[in-house]
Amino acid sequence: MSLDAETDKGVYLFVEGEHQRYSVRLMSGGTFNCTCTLASLKAGKPVICSHVVAAILFETAREK
């Protein structure tokens, strides 16, 4: 996992998946998205995939 960018609106992370690297965006308003297949299949609906969970855990640890 690596931090790509951080703005006042949110953070952008790269998450290493089982088969490739995904981009995860965690926005300050509580919204999020991921570029994985699961998130793409559910377009328009919030999907908490494992990459989003990993990003949230990473951010929680980073804020401490």
Image: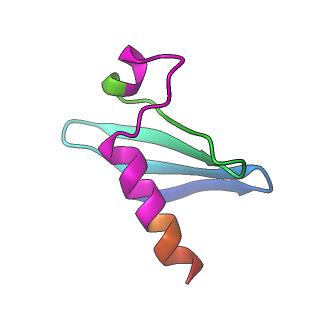
Against 36, residue 18 (above or below) is below
Measuring from the top left, give residue 6's x and y in whole percent: 69, 57
Against 40, residue 8 (above or below) is below
Residue at the left extreme of this rendering:
18
Say left or right for 42 vs 31: left
**Exactly how many numbered labels are in the figure?**
0
Q: Residue at x 48, y 16 (%)?
A: 43
Measuring from the top left, give residue 24's x and y in whole percent: 49, 43
Query: Is 40 colored magenta in this rendering?
Result: yes
Against 25, residue 63 (above or below) is below
Query: Is 4 colored magenta in this rendering?
Result: no
Q: Quadrant of the C terminus?
A: bottom right
Q: Name the residue nearer the viewer: 27 or 30.
A: 30
Q: Residue at x 71, y 52 (%)?
A: 28
Q: Give, as a single range, the part of the protein colored magenta.
A: 39-57
Q: Residue at x 51, y 51 (%)?
A: 13
Say left or right for 28 vs 42: right
Residue at the bottom extreme of this rendering:
64
Residue at the right extreme of this rendering:
8
Measuring from the top left, give residue 50's x and y in whole percent: 31, 46
Colour pattern of the rendering: rainbow
Q: Quadrant of the N terminus?
A: bottom left
Measuring from the top left, give residue 37's x and y in whole percent: 32, 23
Q: Residue at x 77, y 49 (%)?
A: 9
